[in-house]
Image (cartoon, rainbow, N blue to C red):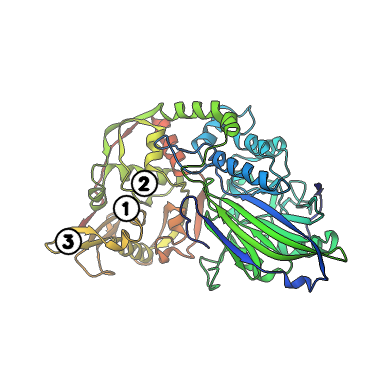
């Protein structure tokens, strides 16, 4: 196997449903017609690429809320990677970004053990990764940590579109690499990262770097690589996702430029394989003749691309077939012992840290009935909104009780208690809304309820099937409101005041909410396209924990600023 790591400069103008455990999803594509008909084939070769993406620090197969083993994490994927290598030693292993942040293990490492190698990098070195692409969360700990991670890695980090400010050179040394397999097949891998990072990240963490448009970067580099390197397989490893429905081409989100995978497939000739991530989706498909893969998050799947070549008498390789698969671990998949050993000490210390008290509640924030919590202001939800308002520096907030398994806080609080209530890695955004927008949002949230025969308020079945969507019901702080759910949908806001006065439709208010909701998630279309005043790129669980640590004791209060009536 021959490697060539390439330095270069950038030009200035530069879906699938969740598979069942243990199952494999795949997509096949036939020969590459761009290459023209081949002469009589004299031999064949199969090249394989294994892909991880958005692992977010999940190494041990551990649910950090309950300490139970679950079928995900890099240790389980490692066992699968080793098995694949036994079958095909000459394969390519790529991580597509967001690997160093996201679990209590990573948080504990940053707070307590920074003098050691990052655990994710130590594991990736053990598994002989060939390359990685920086994701947006690689920047969360600042440039010093990112540089340290890259220096400790025995593999290159590829990103063509991130350049030093005012320069043309890629900031991390190389935009792409070339690998020649033992059979003589040449593979080029171009790395690129979503350029939307400055919209989220702390400016101090990205000072001195420019983030060039990812699509334009790919348009610049693919023909250059095709001409200079003449690869048999052109692979793009893109820490970004798909902005459009893969089947219909209809926009699946606001076209901000955050995700440009669909456009890359259709607008850039010469791409054979597109590795994607960022959206945490499970995708093994084909778009416009390009084989695409996205292996979820947390190490829940290993992406596998297989490409079959034929070699003609003139020595040219022709793509005959491409196949994308998602390989998923299950309860029978044993975690790799060497990987577990690398992280064992840090994992044990993390578990101890999770069980140490970080503060206590004065009063009662326990949730005994999720329905009762959603029918009237509750001390726990008032606390959540207080944390959000302080983090964002605004006076109005909305938040959801994320799951019926959430129990609130009572007595002594540990980090594990925090993670039990804040299981999703949500960050925050501040939108500038009109009074009319807030009224429409309250009407949307009121759809969560129905009134059954006999007058009992119940949860709308639409929020229960085909899956529970309790996280799409919001509760507000900073305004006063009453929702009468006996009224027809769209006319349920019976009272809406701000600072003791009726809220005018044209009034402007800055409101903090989680980033999923700010993007219109949960059918909150009134938020789409609204001005984003600020984004706080710190997980809500971390914000809550820090809030409690700073105070030691938090007070259970409830101002009863809203209620549901019939």
Mark 2 or mark 3: which is in front? Answer: 3
- Position in image of residue 566 (x %, y %): 17, 61
Q: Earlier in the sequence, mark 2 or mark 1?
A: 2
Q: Name the foreground residue: 137 vs 236.
A: 236
Mark 3 crowdedness (10 Å alpha carbons): few <14, some 14-19, many ≥20: few
- Decide if residue 308 is on the left or right side of residue 475: right
- Decide if residue 165 is on the left or right side of residue 349: right
Q: Are marks 3 and 1 in contact (CB under 8 Å)?
A: no
- Decide if residue 510 is on the left or right side of residue 360: right
Mark 2 crowdedness (10 Å alpha carbons): few <14, some 14-19, many ≥20: many
* Residue depicted at 62% across the width and 34% down the height: 118
* Residue depicted at 57% across the width and 43% down the height: 77
**Residue under pointer 3:** 566
Q: Are marks 2 and 3 in contact (CB under 8 Å)?
A: no
Q: Are marks 2 and 1 in contact (CB under 8 Å)?
A: yes
- Alpha carbon distance from label 2 to label 3: 25 Å
- Position in image of residue 455 (x %, y %): 13, 61
**Residue under pointer 2:** 385
Secondary structure of the residue carrying numbered label 2 = helix
Secondary structure of the residue carrying numbered label 1 = strand
On the question of residue 463 being in view, the answer is yes
- Alpha carbon distance from label 3 to label 1: 17 Å
Name the residue at the right extreme: 314
The quarter of the displayed image where residue 168 is located? bottom right
Secondary structure of the residue carrying numbered label 3 = loop
Q: Earlier in the sequence, mark 3 or mark 1?
A: 1
Q: Name the foreground residue: 139 vs 336.
A: 336
- Position in image of residue 555 (x %, y %): 30, 34
């Amino acid at each position: 196997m021959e490697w060539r790591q390439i330095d270069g400069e950038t030009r200035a103008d530069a879906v699938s449903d969740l598979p069942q455990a243990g199952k494999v999803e795949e997509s096949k594509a036939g020969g590459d017609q761009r290459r023209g008909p081949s002469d009589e084939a004299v031999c064949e070769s199969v090249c394989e690429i294994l892909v991880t993406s958005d692992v977010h620090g999940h190494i041990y197969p551990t649910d950090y809320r309950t300490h139970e083993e679950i079928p995900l994490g890099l240790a389980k994927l490692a066992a699968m990677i080793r098995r694949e290598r036994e079958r095909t030693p000459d394969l390519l292993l790529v991580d597509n970004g967001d690997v160093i942040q996201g679990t209590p293990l990573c948080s504990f490492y940053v707070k307590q053990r920074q003098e050691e190698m990052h655990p994710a990098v130590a594991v990736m070195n053990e598994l002989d990764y060939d390359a990685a692409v920086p994701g947006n969360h690689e920047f969360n700990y600042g440039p010093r940590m990112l540089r340290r991670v890259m220096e400790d890695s025995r593999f290159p980090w590829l990103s063509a579109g991130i350049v030093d400010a005012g320069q043309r050179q890629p900031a991390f040394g190389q935009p792409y690499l070339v690998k020649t397999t033992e059979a003589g097949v040449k593979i080029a891998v171009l790395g690129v990262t979503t350029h939307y990072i400055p919209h989220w990240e702390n400016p101090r963490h990205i000072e001195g770097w420019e983030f060039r448009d990812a699509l334009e970067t790919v348009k610049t580099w693919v023909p250059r690589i095709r001409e200079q390197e003449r690869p048999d397989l052109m692979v793009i490893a893109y820490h970004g996702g798909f902005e459009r429905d893969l089947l219909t081409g209809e926009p699946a989100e606001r076209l901000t430029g955050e995700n440009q995978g669909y456009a890359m497939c259709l607008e850039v000739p010469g791409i054979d394989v597109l590795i994607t991530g960022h959206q945490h989706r499970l995708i093994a498909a084909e778009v416009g003749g390009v084989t695409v893969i996205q292996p979820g998050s947390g190490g829940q799947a290993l992406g596998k691309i297989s490409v079959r070549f034929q070699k003609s008498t003139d020595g040219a390789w022709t793509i005959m077939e491409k196949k994308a698969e998602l390989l998923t671990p299950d309860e029978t998949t044993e975690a790799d012992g060497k990987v577990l050993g690398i992280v064992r000490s840090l994992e044990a210390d993390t578990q101890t840290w999770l069980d140490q008290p970080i503060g206590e509640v004065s009063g009662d924030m326990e949730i005994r009935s999720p329905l009762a919590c959603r029918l009237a202001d509750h001390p726990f939800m008032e606390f959540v909104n207080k944390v959000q308002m302080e983090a964002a520096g605004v006076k109005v907030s909305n938040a959801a009780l994320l799951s019926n398994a959430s129990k609130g806080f009572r007595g002594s609080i540990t980090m594990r208690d925090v993670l039990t209530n804040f299981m999703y890695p949500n960050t925050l955004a501040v939108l500038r809304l009109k009074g009319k927008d807030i009224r429409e949002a309250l009407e949307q949230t009121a759809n969560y309820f129905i009134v059954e025969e006999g007058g009992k308020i119940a949860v709308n079945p639409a929020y229960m099937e085909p899956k529970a969507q309790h996280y799409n019901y919001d509760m507000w702080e900073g305004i006063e409101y009453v929702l009468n759910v006996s009224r027809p949908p769209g006319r349920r806001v019976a009272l809406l005041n701000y600072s003791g006065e009726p809220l005018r439709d044209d009034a402007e208010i800055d409101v903090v909410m989680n980033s999923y909701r700010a993007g219109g998630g949960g059918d909150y279309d009134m938020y789409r396209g609204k001005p984003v005043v600020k984004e706080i790129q710190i997980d809500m669980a971390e914000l809550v924990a820090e809030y409690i640590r700073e105070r030691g004791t938090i007070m259970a209060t409830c101002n009863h600023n809203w209620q549901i009536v019939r």
